[in-house]
Image (spheres, helix red, strand yellow):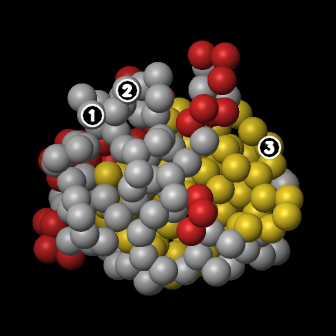
Amino acid sequence: MPKLLYQGHGSYRLESNAGLVIYVDPYAGDGYRAPADIILVTHQHSDHNQIDRCFKKRDCDIVTNAEALEGGTHNSFSIKGVKIQAVEASNINHDPRRCVGYIIELDGVLIYAAGDTSKTAQMDEFAKLNLDYALLPADGVYNMDLREAAQCARLINAKHNIAIHLKPGALFDFKKAEKWDAPNKLIIEPGEEIEL
């Protein structure tokens, strides 16, 4: 089964059955020594784009918001057998012309990497995708708060919902994660790895 290692804040690492490694928004925590096959960056705030933290394979592919939004559209990619679709991400702190989320299909598992966002119009379409995991920011400072993130979780209707980016300047906030009133909630702490 593919795996997810939560590194903290908005950073996590995915690993396929065959050992392919994907980093999403590298910045926080540990666990960057596994050489990257793919690095995904949702936007250029410094707490999401520290690609130099990652060890990289020679043929590592890096997709940032620039490539994801090239041509003024949300682009899709097929890289090393992984399907990646850029999707909307925006709020008062995040310009939709410079920010994206990603839907990642890894070994048949669909993962919504929301990036930094509040509710978007596109989320109305996500329930029909039958997402397996949704990783949603919920700090209530730079992104939506716990209440709005729970509403998004209900709208998206993923099989598992994970709150991340819970406290600016910290890897995690367990008390906030416990309070999050989302369906199918999983609490994953920094350094914890789960099978998807």
In this view, which residue lies farthest toward the top? 72
User: What x and y, as percent, mark residue 99?
Assistant: 46, 34
Disc 1 from disc 2: Cα separation = 7 Å
The three-letter code of the residue at mark 2 reads Asp
Q: Is residue 150 left or right of residue 153?
A: left
Disc 3 from disc 2: Cα separation = 26 Å
For the residue carrying disc 3, how many other residues have a C-alpha within 10 Å: few (<14), some (14-19), or many (20+)? few
Between marks 3 and 2 in the image, the one whose residue lies nearer the viewer? 2
Disc 3 from disc 1: Cα separation = 30 Å
Question: Picture quarter containing residue 45?
Answer: top left
Q: Residue at 35%, 79% (x, y): give it.
A: 189
Disc 1 marks which residue?
93
Disc 3 marks which residue?
78
The three-letter code of the residue at mark 1 reads Asn
The three-letter code of the residue at mark 3 reads Ser
Disc 2 marks which residue?
95
Q: Is residue 116 left or right of residue 44?
A: left
Q: Secondary structure at mark 2?
A: loop
